[in-house]
């Protein structure tokens, strides 16, 4: 016997959307575009502010410019940010869509299913590729202090191999647990809050659940989700501190999540834990514009290239 809703109408069967190669290609392409344009400069500013908490926005920008001009804003782009961007979208899309489907199938509301999908997808992202990528990006961005002493800093690959030889897998994945907490809370918040915003927009505009939102409506919903998800910035500052190459004799060795939080709070107070939140919100807005506003253009290009219809939401 088929399921029936409270109104006596047959319940709409939940269909599992396939995760196609074209969907993964779309996610990777959009992420690569986002990080290569404004994404990495905003990431560098955010990381520099989190690592040098006495600096404001202007001070951080001046510091970055002083260590390489325009190229200073793209430190860590190749290969780490490119590796992260080309894989994280695919991992998130695949895992989040699976988790969201099974949550809905188990009877969860769209809001709860959206949060579940985002949290599980974010967790998979962190441990699959983001741990060592964020670690190496942060090392590159913060090791400029070595250059300040007159010593030429080693190349990216030399730094990677040196850390791997000395500390193994754990060394290149330093701070991965903080990355995991950030990704779980970030994508859980972003997916869930975006769903709430979409529901509100549909109610205001009178659109039903199956109706397509316009591009401005999509940007508004995703932008609200992305901006509000920056509440977990303290986790990001802790992650940067754990991975930072900044030298401080008062800094405890082998920092964990809680010891890093205690160290930051003791030196900079609550304000220090929110350093870099402004560029992070800007990064969220730029990611939204790339994924939503440019999504349709990228979707058409991928469909022409693969001959396969893209079914991913963006």
Image: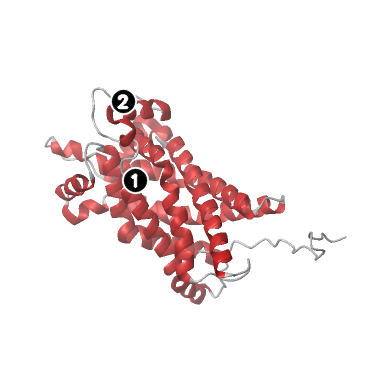
- Neighbour class for label 1 at 10 Å: few (<14), some, many (≥20)? many
Where is residue 27 shown, x and y percent of the image?
48, 61
Toward the left, the furthest residue is 150
Identify residue for label 2: 266
Residue at the spot 59% in from the left edge and 61% down from the top edge? 19
Residue at the spot 57% in from the left edge and 52% down from the top edge? 96
Q: Tell me: residue 100, above or below residue 178.
A: below
Residue at the spot 39% in from the left edge and 42% down from the top edge? 233
Alpha carbon of mark 2 to alpha carbon of mark 1: how far?
A: 19 Å
Toward the right, the furthest residue is 1
Q: Residue 277 carries which label?
A: 1
Toward the front, the furthest residue is 204
Secondary structure beneath label 2: helix
Q: Tell me: residue 90, above or below residue 254.
A: below
Residue 186 as seen in the image, left or right of residue 59: right
Q: Kindly indicate the quadrant of the structure image that contains residue 307.
A: bottom right
Q: Tell me: residue 1, above or below residue 252.
A: below
Residue 307 as seen in the image, left or right of residue 242: right
Where is residue 188 shown, x and y percent of the image?
53, 47
- Neighbour class for label 2 at 10 Å: few (<14), some, many (≥20)? few
Q: Nearer the viewer, residue 76 or 191?
A: 191
Q: Kindly indicate the quadrant of the structure image that contains residue 33.
A: bottom left
In the picture, the quarter occupied by the N terminus is: bottom right
Q: Are the residues at dot 2 and dot 1 in contact (C-beta closer than 8 Å)?
A: no
Q: Nearer the viewer, residue 295 or 269?
A: 269
Earlier along the polypeptide chain: callout 2 or callout 1?
2
Residue 269 as seen in the image, left or right of residue 293: left
The chosen color scheme is secondary structure
Where is residue 251 shown, x and y percent of the image?
28, 25
Q: Tell me: residue 284, above or below residue 183.
A: below
């Amino acid at each position: 016997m088929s399921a029936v809703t409270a109104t006596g109408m047959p319940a709409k069967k939940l269909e599992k959307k396939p995760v196609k190669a074209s969907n993964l290609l779309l996610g990777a392409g959009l992420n690569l575009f986002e990080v290569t344009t404004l994404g990495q400069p905003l990431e560098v500013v955010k990381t520099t502010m989190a690592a040098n908490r006495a600096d404001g926005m202007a001070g951080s920008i001046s510091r970055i410019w002083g260590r390489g001009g325009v190229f200073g804003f793209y430190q860590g782009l190749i290969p780490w940010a490119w590796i992260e961007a080309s894989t994280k979208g695919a991992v998130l899309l695949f895992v989040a869509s699976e988790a969201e489907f099974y949550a809905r199938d188990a009877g969860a509301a769209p809001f709860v299913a959206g949060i579940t999908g985002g949290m599980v997808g974010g967790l998979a992202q962190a441990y699959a590729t983001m741990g060592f990528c964020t670690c190496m990006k942060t090392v590159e961005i913060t090791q400029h202090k070595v250059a300040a002493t007159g010593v030429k800093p080693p190349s990216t690959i030399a730094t990677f191999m040196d850390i791997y030889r000395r500390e193994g897998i754990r060394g290149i994945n330093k701070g991965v647990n903080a990355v995991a907490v950030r990704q779980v809370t970030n994508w859980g918040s972003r997916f869930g809050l975006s769903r709430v915003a979409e529901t509100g927009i549909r109610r205001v505009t009178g659109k039903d659940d199956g109706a397509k939102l316009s591009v401005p409506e999509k940007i508004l919903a995703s932008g609200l989700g992305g901006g509000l998800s920056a509440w977990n910035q303290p986790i990001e500052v802790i992650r940067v501190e754990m991975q930072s190459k900044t030298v401080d004799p008062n800094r405890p060795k082998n920092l964990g999540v809680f010891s890093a939080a205690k160290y930051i709070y003791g030196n900079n107070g609550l304000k220090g834990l929110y350093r870099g939140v402004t560029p992070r919100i800007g990064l969220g807005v730029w990611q939204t514009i790339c994924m939503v506003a440019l999504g349709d253009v990228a979707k058409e290009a991928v469909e022409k290239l693969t001959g396969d219809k893209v079914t991913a939401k963006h």
